[in-house]
Image (cartoon, rainbow, N blue to C red):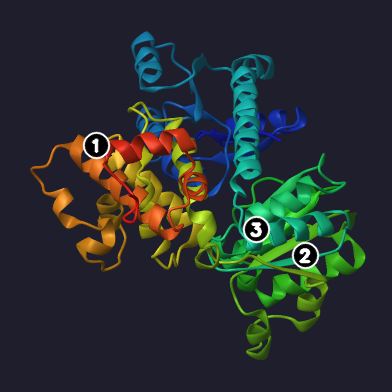
Amino acid sequence: MNTILIVDDEKNILKMLSQGLSIKGYNTLTASSGEEALQLCISEDIDLVLLDIMMENGIDGVETLRKLLEQHPQLNVVMMSAQQDVEIAAKTMELGARRYVTKPVGMDKILSNIEPFLELSRLAKENEILKSQIVIDDEMVGESDAVFKLRAEIRQVAASDLGVLISGENGTGKQLVANAIHRHSKRADNPFIPLNCAALPEELVESELFGHERGAFTGADSMRQGRFELADGGTLFLDEIGDMTLKAQAKVLRVLEYGEVERLGSQQIRNVDVRIIAATNKDLPQEIERGEFRTDLYYRLKIVPIEVPPLRERLKDIPILVKYFAERLQMNMASAPKTFASEAYPIFQSYGWPGNIRELKNIVERLLIMVNREIILPTDVAEVLPIEMDQTEIYGSAAAYQSNTPLSTMVDSAEAECILAALKENDWNIRKTAEVLEVERSNLYKKMNKYNIARPDAG
Protein backbone atom coordinates (compact mmCIF):
# COMPACT_ATOMS: atom_id res chain seq x y z
CA MET A 1 0.00 0.00 0.00
CA ASN A 2 1.40 3.39 -1.02
CA THR A 3 1.85 6.01 1.72
CA ILE A 4 1.06 9.64 0.91
CA LEU A 5 2.03 12.54 3.16
CA ILE A 6 -0.27 15.59 2.93
CA VAL A 7 1.26 18.87 4.11
CA ASP A 8 -1.02 21.91 4.57
CA ASP A 9 -1.70 24.38 7.37
CA GLU A 10 -5.46 24.28 6.68
CA LYS A 11 -7.11 21.51 8.73
CA ASN A 12 -10.09 21.20 6.38
CA ILE A 13 -7.78 20.54 3.41
CA LEU A 14 -5.87 17.91 5.39
CA LYS A 15 -9.09 16.18 6.44
CA MET A 16 -10.67 16.27 2.97
CA LEU A 17 -7.61 14.93 1.15
CA SER A 18 -6.81 12.34 3.83
CA GLN A 19 -10.34 10.91 3.79
CA GLY A 20 -10.58 10.95 0.00
CA LEU A 21 -7.24 9.20 -0.53
CA SER A 22 -7.97 6.66 2.24
CA ILE A 23 -11.22 5.72 0.48
CA LYS A 24 -9.18 5.15 -2.69
CA GLY A 25 -7.02 2.65 -0.79
CA TYR A 26 -3.99 4.79 0.07
CA ASN A 27 -2.31 5.04 3.45
CA THR A 28 -2.15 8.72 4.44
CA LEU A 29 -0.16 10.82 6.89
CA THR A 30 -0.73 14.52 7.58
CA ALA A 31 1.47 17.41 8.65
CA SER A 32 0.50 21.03 9.32
CA SER A 33 4.00 22.48 8.84
CA GLY A 34 7.14 21.97 6.81
CA GLU A 35 9.14 21.04 9.90
CA GLU A 36 6.67 18.31 10.81
CA ALA A 37 6.81 17.00 7.25
CA LEU A 38 10.60 16.76 7.36
CA GLN A 39 10.46 14.71 10.56
CA LEU A 40 7.83 12.34 9.18
CA CYS A 41 9.89 11.72 6.06
CA ILE A 42 12.75 10.57 8.28
CA SER A 43 10.67 8.19 10.43
CA GLU A 44 8.20 6.90 7.82
CA ASP A 45 8.48 5.17 4.44
CA ILE A 46 6.69 7.72 2.24
CA ASP A 47 6.02 7.28 -1.48
CA LEU A 48 4.68 10.76 -2.32
CA VAL A 49 4.20 14.17 -0.68
CA LEU A 50 1.34 16.56 -1.45
CA LEU A 51 2.83 19.89 -0.37
CA ASP A 52 1.12 23.27 -0.03
CA ILE A 53 3.22 26.30 -0.99
CA MET A 54 1.72 29.06 1.15
CA MET A 55 2.03 27.97 4.79
CA GLU A 56 2.16 30.37 7.69
CA ASN A 57 3.46 27.89 10.26
CA GLY A 58 7.26 27.84 10.02
CA ILE A 59 9.02 27.43 6.67
CA ASP A 60 7.01 27.74 3.45
CA GLY A 61 6.41 25.06 0.84
CA VAL A 62 9.30 26.03 -1.42
CA GLU A 63 11.85 25.78 1.39
CA THR A 64 10.24 22.55 2.60
CA LEU A 65 10.57 21.15 -0.94
CA ARG A 66 14.24 22.10 -1.09
CA LYS A 67 15.01 20.43 2.26
CA LEU A 68 12.95 17.34 1.49
CA LEU A 69 14.80 16.69 -1.75
CA GLU A 70 18.17 17.32 -0.10
CA GLN A 71 17.36 14.52 2.34
CA HIS A 72 15.47 12.25 -0.13
CA PRO A 73 16.50 13.05 -3.73
CA GLN A 74 14.16 10.42 -5.27
CA LEU A 75 11.06 11.48 -3.31
CA ASN A 76 7.94 12.28 -5.37
CA VAL A 77 6.59 15.74 -4.41
CA VAL A 78 3.47 17.34 -5.92
CA MET A 79 2.99 21.02 -5.07
CA MET A 80 -0.38 22.65 -4.32
CA SER A 81 -1.25 26.35 -4.31
CA ALA A 82 -4.33 28.57 -4.31
CA GLN A 83 -2.44 30.98 -6.60
CA GLN A 84 -1.56 30.23 -10.20
CA ASP A 85 1.88 31.80 -10.08
CA VAL A 86 3.90 30.79 -13.14
CA GLU A 87 7.19 31.97 -11.64
CA ILE A 88 6.78 29.96 -8.41
CA ALA A 89 5.57 26.95 -10.36
CA ALA A 90 8.67 27.08 -12.54
CA LYS A 91 10.89 27.43 -9.47
CA THR A 92 9.39 24.39 -7.75
CA MET A 93 9.74 22.29 -10.91
CA GLU A 94 13.34 23.42 -11.21
CA LEU A 95 13.95 22.29 -7.61
CA GLY A 96 12.58 18.85 -8.44
CA ALA A 97 8.81 18.86 -7.83
CA ARG A 98 6.92 16.40 -10.04
CA ARG A 99 3.79 18.51 -10.61
CA TYR A 100 2.17 21.82 -9.64
CA VAL A 101 -1.61 21.88 -9.11
CA THR A 102 -3.85 24.79 -8.20
CA LYS A 103 -6.56 24.76 -5.53
CA PRO A 104 -9.38 23.90 -5.19
CA VAL A 105 -8.27 20.34 -5.85
CA GLY A 106 -10.91 17.68 -6.45
CA MET A 107 -10.09 14.04 -5.92
CA ASP A 108 -10.06 13.26 -9.67
CA LYS A 109 -7.54 16.03 -10.25
CA ILE A 110 -5.35 14.84 -7.38
CA LEU A 111 -5.40 11.22 -8.53
CA SER A 112 -4.51 12.08 -12.12
CA ASN A 113 -1.47 14.01 -10.88
CA ILE A 114 -0.16 11.51 -8.34
CA GLU A 115 -0.93 8.04 -9.68
CA PRO A 116 1.76 7.97 -12.41
CA PHE A 117 4.44 8.71 -9.80
CA LEU A 118 3.04 6.21 -7.29
CA GLU A 119 3.27 3.55 -9.99
CA LEU A 120 6.90 4.51 -10.62
CA SER A 121 7.58 4.27 -6.89
CA ARG A 122 6.02 0.80 -6.75
CA LEU A 123 8.08 -0.41 -9.72
CA ALA A 124 11.27 1.05 -8.22
CA LYS A 125 10.66 -0.83 -4.94
CA GLU A 126 9.99 -4.08 -6.79
CA ASN A 127 13.18 -3.57 -8.78
CA GLU A 128 15.21 -3.06 -5.59
CA ILE A 129 13.74 -6.25 -4.11
CA LEU A 130 14.59 -8.20 -7.28
CA LYS A 131 18.14 -6.82 -7.33
CA SER A 132 18.66 -7.71 -3.68
CA GLN A 133 17.37 -11.22 -4.30
CA ILE A 134 19.76 -11.63 -7.24
CA VAL A 135 22.65 -10.62 -5.00
CA ILE A 136 21.44 -13.00 -2.31
CA ASP A 137 21.28 -15.84 -4.87
CA ASP A 138 24.89 -15.24 -5.87
CA GLU A 139 26.69 -14.23 -2.69
CA MET A 140 26.64 -17.56 -0.84
CA VAL A 141 29.78 -18.57 -2.68
CA GLY A 142 32.66 -20.73 -1.59
CA GLU A 143 34.12 -24.21 -1.78
CA SER A 144 35.10 -24.80 1.84
CA ASP A 145 33.70 -27.67 3.90
CA ALA A 146 31.91 -25.10 6.08
CA VAL A 147 29.99 -23.69 3.10
CA PHE A 148 29.07 -27.14 1.76
CA LYS A 149 27.75 -28.06 5.23
CA LEU A 150 25.79 -24.82 5.42
CA ARG A 151 24.19 -25.36 2.01
CA ALA A 152 23.18 -28.90 3.00
CA GLU A 153 21.56 -27.62 6.22
CA ILE A 154 19.64 -24.98 4.26
CA ARG A 155 18.24 -27.54 1.81
CA GLN A 156 17.26 -29.85 4.64
CA VAL A 157 15.45 -27.28 6.79
CA ALA A 158 13.80 -25.50 3.84
CA ALA A 159 11.54 -28.49 3.18
CA SER A 160 9.79 -28.04 6.54
CA ASP A 161 7.92 -25.24 8.29
CA LEU A 162 9.93 -25.54 11.49
CA GLY A 163 11.30 -22.51 13.29
CA VAL A 164 14.97 -21.78 12.67
CA LEU A 165 17.44 -19.93 14.88
CA ILE A 166 20.51 -18.74 12.98
CA SER A 167 23.49 -17.74 15.08
CA GLY A 168 26.76 -16.20 14.03
CA GLU A 169 28.95 -13.13 14.28
CA ASN A 170 28.06 -9.83 12.63
CA GLY A 171 28.73 -9.78 8.92
CA THR A 172 28.72 -13.55 8.39
CA GLY A 173 25.62 -13.51 6.18
CA LYS A 174 22.80 -14.62 8.50
CA GLN A 175 20.17 -12.86 6.36
CA LEU A 176 21.53 -14.59 3.24
CA VAL A 177 20.93 -17.93 4.99
CA ALA A 178 17.41 -16.92 6.04
CA ASN A 179 16.55 -15.78 2.54
CA ALA A 180 17.97 -18.98 1.04
CA ILE A 181 15.79 -21.07 3.37
CA HIS A 182 12.73 -19.09 2.27
CA ARG A 183 13.55 -19.35 -1.45
CA HIS A 184 13.90 -23.13 -1.25
CA SER A 185 10.72 -23.58 0.80
CA LYS A 186 7.10 -24.07 -0.24
CA ARG A 187 6.53 -20.43 0.80
CA ALA A 188 8.92 -19.08 -1.83
CA ASP A 189 6.14 -17.38 -3.85
CA ASN A 190 4.94 -15.46 -0.78
CA PRO A 191 6.63 -12.54 1.02
CA PHE A 192 9.96 -12.65 2.81
CA ILE A 193 9.72 -9.82 5.36
CA PRO A 194 12.85 -8.86 7.34
CA LEU A 195 12.93 -6.84 10.56
CA ASN A 196 16.13 -5.78 12.32
CA CYS A 197 15.12 -5.72 15.98
CA ALA A 198 18.35 -3.94 17.00
CA ALA A 199 17.75 -1.00 14.65
CA LEU A 200 14.35 -0.06 16.12
CA PRO A 201 13.66 2.15 19.15
CA GLU A 202 12.03 0.13 21.92
CA GLU A 203 8.73 2.00 21.62
CA LEU A 204 8.37 1.11 17.91
CA VAL A 205 9.09 -2.63 18.03
CA GLU A 206 5.51 -3.68 18.81
CA SER A 207 4.04 -1.31 16.23
CA GLU A 208 6.39 -2.70 13.57
CA LEU A 209 5.61 -6.31 14.47
CA PHE A 210 1.86 -6.13 15.01
CA GLY A 211 0.76 -2.89 13.34
CA HIS A 212 -1.46 -0.19 14.78
CA GLU A 213 -4.80 1.50 14.29
CA ARG A 214 -5.20 5.20 13.65
CA GLY A 215 -4.92 7.10 16.95
CA ALA A 216 -3.41 4.15 18.84
CA PHE A 217 -0.64 6.43 20.10
CA THR A 218 0.74 9.91 19.47
CA GLY A 219 1.81 10.12 15.84
CA ALA A 220 -0.33 7.16 14.68
CA ASP A 221 -2.18 9.24 12.08
CA SER A 222 -3.26 6.23 10.01
CA MET A 223 -3.71 2.49 10.18
CA ARG A 224 -0.57 0.46 9.54
CA GLN A 225 -0.14 -3.25 9.02
CA GLY A 226 2.57 -4.95 11.06
CA ARG A 227 5.30 -7.25 9.75
CA PHE A 228 3.35 -10.36 10.81
CA GLU A 229 0.42 -9.35 8.60
CA LEU A 230 2.70 -8.41 5.73
CA ALA A 231 4.42 -11.81 5.97
CA ASP A 232 1.15 -13.78 6.01
CA GLY A 233 1.68 -16.95 3.97
CA GLY A 234 5.42 -16.31 3.83
CA THR A 235 8.40 -15.89 6.14
CA LEU A 236 9.19 -13.30 8.80
CA PHE A 237 12.91 -12.89 9.48
CA LEU A 238 13.63 -11.42 12.92
CA ASP A 239 17.26 -10.32 12.79
CA GLU A 240 19.10 -9.70 16.08
CA ILE A 241 16.18 -11.08 18.08
CA GLY A 242 18.36 -10.99 21.18
CA ASP A 243 17.75 -7.22 21.27
CA MET A 244 13.95 -7.56 21.40
CA THR A 245 12.18 -6.39 24.57
CA LEU A 246 10.66 -8.95 26.94
CA LYS A 247 7.21 -7.49 26.32
CA ALA A 248 7.55 -7.95 22.57
CA GLN A 249 8.99 -11.44 23.11
CA ALA A 250 5.83 -12.46 24.97
CA LYS A 251 3.66 -11.29 22.08
CA VAL A 252 5.83 -13.06 19.50
CA LEU A 253 5.48 -16.25 21.53
CA ARG A 254 1.69 -15.87 21.46
CA VAL A 255 1.74 -15.58 17.67
CA LEU A 256 3.88 -18.73 17.43
CA GLU A 257 1.48 -20.63 19.70
CA TYR A 258 -1.88 -19.44 18.36
CA GLY A 259 -1.19 -17.84 14.96
CA GLU A 260 -3.00 -14.66 16.02
CA VAL A 261 -2.03 -10.99 16.00
CA GLU A 262 -3.70 -7.90 17.38
CA ARG A 263 -2.83 -4.42 16.18
CA LEU A 264 -2.06 -1.76 18.78
CA GLY A 265 -5.28 0.14 19.52
CA SER A 266 -7.48 -2.69 18.23
CA GLN A 267 -9.37 -5.55 19.85
CA GLN A 268 -9.81 -7.46 16.59
CA ILE A 269 -7.89 -10.74 16.36
CA ARG A 270 -6.34 -11.55 12.97
CA ASN A 271 -5.12 -15.00 12.02
CA VAL A 272 -1.75 -15.23 10.27
CA ASP A 273 0.22 -18.10 8.78
CA VAL A 274 3.87 -17.10 9.17
CA ARG A 275 7.10 -19.02 9.39
CA ILE A 276 9.58 -17.45 11.80
CA ILE A 277 13.30 -17.46 11.12
CA ALA A 278 15.30 -15.64 13.78
CA ALA A 279 18.95 -14.67 13.96
CA THR A 280 21.28 -13.42 16.67
CA ASN A 281 24.92 -12.65 17.37
CA LYS A 282 24.32 -12.98 21.11
CA ASP A 283 24.66 -15.96 23.42
CA LEU A 284 20.94 -16.44 24.14
CA PRO A 285 21.39 -19.01 26.98
CA GLN A 286 23.53 -16.36 28.71
CA GLU A 287 20.81 -13.75 28.03
CA ILE A 288 18.27 -16.13 29.60
CA GLU A 289 20.41 -16.41 32.76
CA ARG A 290 20.51 -12.62 32.96
CA GLY A 291 16.72 -12.45 32.61
CA GLU A 292 16.92 -10.67 29.25
CA PHE A 293 15.41 -13.44 27.08
CA ARG A 294 12.48 -15.79 27.56
CA THR A 295 13.33 -19.50 27.91
CA ASP A 296 10.07 -20.63 26.28
CA LEU A 297 10.60 -18.41 23.25
CA TYR A 298 14.21 -19.58 22.91
CA TYR A 299 13.23 -23.25 22.67
CA ARG A 300 10.32 -22.40 20.39
CA LEU A 301 12.70 -20.66 17.98
CA LYS A 302 15.56 -23.13 18.30
CA ILE A 303 13.77 -26.14 16.82
CA VAL A 304 16.43 -26.13 14.10
CA PRO A 305 19.68 -24.31 15.01
CA ILE A 306 22.06 -23.20 12.25
CA GLU A 307 25.53 -21.79 12.99
CA VAL A 308 27.02 -19.54 10.29
CA PRO A 309 30.83 -19.86 10.40
CA PRO A 310 33.03 -16.76 10.63
CA LEU A 311 35.24 -15.93 7.66
CA ARG A 312 38.43 -16.86 9.54
CA GLU A 313 37.18 -20.47 9.46
CA ARG A 314 36.68 -20.27 5.69
CA LEU A 315 40.15 -19.24 4.50
CA LYS A 316 39.81 -21.37 1.37
CA ASP A 317 36.84 -19.22 0.30
CA ILE A 318 38.60 -15.85 0.59
CA PRO A 319 40.20 -15.79 -2.91
CA ILE A 320 36.86 -16.89 -4.40
CA LEU A 321 34.99 -14.16 -2.52
CA VAL A 322 37.54 -11.48 -3.47
CA LYS A 323 37.22 -12.36 -7.17
CA TYR A 324 33.43 -12.50 -6.90
CA PHE A 325 33.12 -9.12 -5.17
CA ALA A 326 35.59 -7.53 -7.58
CA GLU A 327 33.55 -8.68 -10.57
CA ARG A 328 30.21 -7.64 -9.07
CA LEU A 329 31.38 -4.24 -7.84
CA GLN A 330 33.05 -3.31 -11.12
CA MET A 331 29.80 -3.76 -13.04
CA ASN A 332 28.82 -0.29 -11.79
CA MET A 333 32.25 1.35 -12.17
CA ALA A 334 33.33 3.38 -15.18
CA SER A 335 37.05 2.75 -14.67
CA ALA A 336 39.10 0.09 -16.47
CA PRO A 337 38.72 -3.43 -15.03
CA LYS A 338 41.13 -4.32 -12.24
CA THR A 339 42.35 -7.69 -11.01
CA PHE A 340 44.17 -8.85 -7.90
CA ALA A 341 47.67 -10.29 -8.20
CA SER A 342 47.55 -13.94 -7.14
CA GLU A 343 50.14 -13.34 -4.40
CA ALA A 344 47.76 -10.79 -2.83
CA TYR A 345 45.40 -13.53 -1.64
CA PRO A 346 47.69 -14.83 1.14
CA ILE A 347 47.66 -11.29 2.56
CA PHE A 348 43.84 -11.41 2.71
CA GLN A 349 44.05 -14.85 4.33
CA SER A 350 46.50 -13.70 7.01
CA TYR A 351 43.96 -11.26 8.50
CA GLY A 352 41.40 -12.26 11.15
CA TRP A 353 38.34 -10.49 9.59
CA PRO A 354 36.39 -9.48 12.72
CA GLY A 355 33.79 -7.91 10.41
CA ASN A 356 33.62 -11.11 8.34
CA ILE A 357 32.24 -11.11 4.77
CA ARG A 358 30.81 -7.60 5.09
CA GLU A 359 34.26 -6.26 6.00
CA LEU A 360 35.90 -8.19 3.15
CA LYS A 361 33.47 -6.72 0.64
CA ASN A 362 34.15 -3.20 1.92
CA ILE A 363 37.92 -3.70 1.70
CA VAL A 364 37.68 -5.01 -1.89
CA GLU A 365 35.54 -2.02 -2.88
CA ARG A 366 38.00 0.42 -1.27
CA LEU A 367 40.92 -1.12 -3.17
CA LEU A 368 39.06 -1.01 -6.49
CA ILE A 369 38.39 2.69 -5.98
CA MET A 370 41.71 3.79 -4.51
CA VAL A 371 44.29 1.82 -6.53
CA ASN A 372 45.07 3.52 -9.86
CA ARG A 373 46.50 0.43 -11.54
CA GLU A 374 44.96 -2.48 -13.40
CA ILE A 375 46.63 -4.97 -11.06
CA ILE A 376 46.18 -4.67 -7.29
CA LEU A 377 49.38 -5.79 -5.58
CA PRO A 378 50.04 -7.36 -2.15
CA THR A 379 51.40 -4.03 -0.93
CA ASP A 380 48.06 -2.36 -1.71
CA VAL A 381 46.21 -4.95 0.35
CA ALA A 382 48.68 -4.77 3.24
CA GLU A 383 48.25 -0.98 3.39
CA VAL A 384 44.49 -1.16 4.04
CA LEU A 385 44.49 -4.11 6.46
CA PRO A 386 45.38 -3.46 10.14
CA ILE A 387 48.10 -6.11 10.23
CA GLU A 388 51.85 -5.86 10.67
CA MET A 389 53.93 -7.62 8.01
CA ASP A 390 57.46 -7.03 6.87
CA GLN A 391 58.23 -6.54 3.20
CA THR A 392 59.50 -10.09 2.63
CA GLU A 393 56.23 -11.48 3.95
CA ILE A 394 54.26 -9.29 1.55
CA TYR A 395 56.03 -10.01 -1.69
CA GLY A 396 58.96 -12.31 -1.12
CA SER A 397 61.59 -9.93 -2.48
CA ALA A 398 61.35 -6.31 -1.43
CA ALA A 399 63.95 -5.23 -3.96
CA ALA A 400 61.56 -5.91 -6.83
CA TYR A 401 59.24 -3.21 -5.55
CA GLN A 402 61.41 -0.09 -5.41
CA SER A 403 59.43 3.06 -5.96
CA ASN A 404 61.40 3.85 -9.14
CA THR A 405 60.74 0.43 -10.70
CA PRO A 406 58.44 0.41 -13.78
CA LEU A 407 55.04 -1.20 -13.25
CA SER A 408 55.65 -3.90 -15.90
CA THR A 409 58.84 -4.96 -14.12
CA MET A 410 57.05 -5.06 -10.77
CA VAL A 411 54.28 -7.23 -12.16
CA ASP A 412 56.72 -9.59 -13.93
CA SER A 413 58.78 -9.94 -10.79
CA ALA A 414 55.71 -10.68 -8.68
CA GLU A 415 54.50 -13.27 -11.21
CA ALA A 416 57.91 -14.95 -11.31
CA GLU A 417 58.02 -15.13 -7.50
CA CYS A 418 54.54 -16.65 -7.43
CA ILE A 419 55.35 -19.31 -10.08
CA LEU A 420 58.61 -20.24 -8.35
CA ALA A 421 56.90 -20.58 -4.97
CA ALA A 422 54.12 -22.74 -6.45
CA LEU A 423 56.63 -25.00 -8.20
CA LYS A 424 58.59 -25.54 -4.99
CA GLU A 425 55.38 -26.20 -3.02
CA ASN A 426 54.31 -28.86 -5.54
CA ASP A 427 57.78 -30.48 -5.77
CA TRP A 428 58.20 -29.13 -9.30
CA ASN A 429 55.22 -31.13 -10.59
CA ILE A 430 54.14 -29.11 -13.65
CA ARG A 431 50.61 -30.54 -13.84
CA LYS A 432 49.83 -29.83 -10.16
CA THR A 433 51.41 -26.39 -10.32
CA ALA A 434 49.36 -25.47 -13.42
CA GLU A 435 46.18 -26.57 -11.66
CA VAL A 436 46.99 -24.53 -8.55
CA LEU A 437 47.79 -21.42 -10.62
CA GLU A 438 44.75 -22.05 -12.88
CA VAL A 439 46.76 -21.87 -16.12
CA GLU A 440 47.36 -24.26 -19.02
CA ARG A 441 50.55 -26.33 -18.76
CA SER A 442 51.75 -24.94 -22.10
CA ASN A 443 51.30 -21.41 -20.75
CA LEU A 444 53.17 -22.31 -17.58
CA TYR A 445 56.12 -23.61 -19.61
CA LYS A 446 56.18 -20.35 -21.61
CA LYS A 447 56.27 -18.26 -18.44
CA MET A 448 59.03 -20.44 -16.96
CA ASN A 449 61.09 -19.83 -20.09
CA LYS A 450 60.31 -16.12 -19.97
CA TYR A 451 61.57 -15.79 -16.40
CA ASN A 452 64.41 -18.33 -16.75
CA ILE A 453 62.88 -20.58 -14.10
CA ALA A 454 64.35 -24.10 -14.10
CA ARG A 455 64.45 -26.95 -11.62
CA PRO A 456 67.74 -26.75 -9.70
CA ASP A 457 68.67 -30.40 -10.38
CA ALA A 458 67.69 -30.23 -14.07
CA GLY A 459 70.62 -31.08 -16.33
**Which marked residue is nearer to the observer: mark 2 or mark 1?**
1
Instruction: Kindly indicate whether the residue at mark 2 contacts the one at mark 3 (C-beta within 8 angstroms).
Output: no
Choose between 222 and 160: the one closer to the eye.
Answer: 160
Kindly give the residue lying farthest to the front in the view shown: 459
Instruction: Kindly indicate whether the residue at mark 1 contacts the one at mark 3 (C-beta within 8 angstroms).
Output: no
Residue beneath disc 1: 372
3 or 2: tag closer to the N-terminus? 3
What's the CA distance linking mark 2 and mark 1? 45 Å
Q: Secondary structure at mark 2?
A: strand
Choose between 130 and 48: the one closer to the eye.
Answer: 130
**Amino acid on which disc 1 is placed:** Asn
Q: Is residue 384 above or below residue 10?
A: below
**Amino acid on which disc 3 is placed:** Val
Choose between 362 and 240: the one closer to the eye.
Answer: 362
Count of numbered tags = 3
Q: Residue at x 65, y 29 (%)?
A: 122
Residue 37 image point, x, y percent: 48, 41
**Amino acid on which disc 2 is placed:** Val
Position of residue 377 in the picture relative to residue 363 (left or right) = left
Residue beneath disc 3: 147
Q: Is residue 289 above or below residue 7?
A: below
- Quarter location, residue 189: top right
Choose between 272 and 168: the one closer to the eye.
Answer: 168
Residue 129 image point, x, y percent: 64, 37
- Quarter location, residue 196: bottom right
Residue beneath disc 2: 164
Q: Residue at x 34, y 41 (%)?
A: 448
